[in-house]
Image: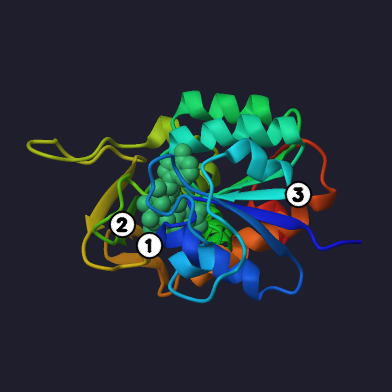
Amino acid sequence: MDKPGIVIAGASGRMGQMLARTVLDSDQARLVGAIERPGSPWVGRDLGEAMGGPALGIVVTDDAVEAIAKAQALIDFTTPAATVAFAELTAQARAVHVIGTTGLQPADLEKLKAAARHAPIIRAGNMSLGVNLLVGLTRRVAAALGEDWDVEVVEAHHNRKVDAPSGTALMLGAAAAEGRGRSLDELRTPAREGITGAREKGSIGFAAIRGGDVVGEHDVIFATAGERVVLRHVATDRAIFARGALRAALWGQDKGPGEYDMADVLGL
Ligand SMILES: NC(=O)c1ccc[n+]([C@@H]2O[C@H](COP(=O)([O-])OP(=O)(O)OC[C@H]3O[C@@H](n4cnc5c(N)ncnc54)[C@H](O)[C@@H]3O)[C@@H](O)[C@H]2O)c1
Ligand SMILES: O=C(O)C1=N[C@H](C(=O)O)CCC1
């Protein structure tokens, strides 16, 4: 069987360029297209040259319909609005949609759910093996420690990040809530500022740091009287997210319509 053809959305972005290199380096997939937003200076240019290397014969396009028609999978690390629009197109093309985009709101998730009735969607706020393992550990530790231990998730990212808390922080917070048999919606504390009052027992708090070129750091802190347990993940290279996304695109090739995550892909 031919190697699956992959299209990258958001090709000029931090993740888009990393994804393009990862697919090009892979012997299991072919890079068949690159999509950018209308008006991007990359549209109409050869992708390889735009990335500062030799020509690849792949012209960056803003015509997502045409690009997706040539592919078996779309890898999409863009914006919530773009991701929702792409989901409709991958559903029509019956192509696998791998979504790394974070900051999706409940209304966006409803639209993804509808699209996933027609083709597989694999979505995770973090596609690295390490974070997805940490999600499972967080669930177990939260279940073992119980409500006398306060849970706080602290994350740090680069100064270009537009959403907070990070998608990863929300995955970790949701895992802690699940460990306690609750949902994050029930336990989540709004961002703190001013006279907040004392901490509500059992709640889960989030804090976000933004600065420089931090790739991504997450601490899940369990704190009680006299001691603390801290679970930590530190990302130093965006390649970990791109490798996870390509693995998801390959894994999805023989899957039916539905919503999947990286725990499904990694068998965790
Ligand atoms: N899930 C993960 O493992 C993971 C890892 C890293 C980043 N992310 C998320 O991926 C997203 C992108 O991150 P980034 O750092 O690469 O951002 P970025 O701003 O560098 O890149 C986003 C790209 O998407 C493009 N884009 C926007 N609208 C588009 C459209 N309609 N069509 C095509 N392209 C469009 C932009 O022009 C830009 O090039 C963010 O939501 C981030 O949180 C997720
Ligand atoms: O750089 C980003 O943006 C990242 N986003 C994801 C998140 O929101 O958790 C994953 C880490 C990097």
Ligand 2 falls in which quarter?
bottom left
Q: Type of residue at label 2?
A: Val
SS for dot 3: loop
- The residue to which callout 3 is attached is 72
Q: Earlier in the sequence, mark 2 or mark 1?
A: 2
Q: Is mark 2 within 8 Å of ligand 2?
A: no
Q: How was this image coloured? A: rainbow
Q: Earlier in the sequence, mark 2 or mark 3?
A: 3
- The residue to which callout 1 is attached is 218
- The residue to which callout 2 is attached is 154
Left or right of 129 on screen, residue 235: left
Q: Type of residue at label 3?
A: Gln
Badge 1 crowding class, 10 Å Cα cut-off, few under 14, some 14 to 19, many 20 or more, is many
Residue 38: where, in percent of width, then height?
Answer: 43, 39
Residue 23: where, in percent of width, then height?
Answer: 64, 67
**In the rendered image, the vertical position of residue 112 relative to residue 265, given as above or below:** above
**In the rendered image, the vertical position of residue 112 relative to residue 101, given as above or below:** above
Residue 23 showing in the rendered view: yes
SS for dot 2: strand
Left or right of 31 on screen, residue 154: left
Left or right of 168 on screen, residue 99: right
Q: Is mark 1 within 8 Å of ligand 2?
A: yes
Q: Earlier in the sequence, mark 1 or mark 3?
A: 3
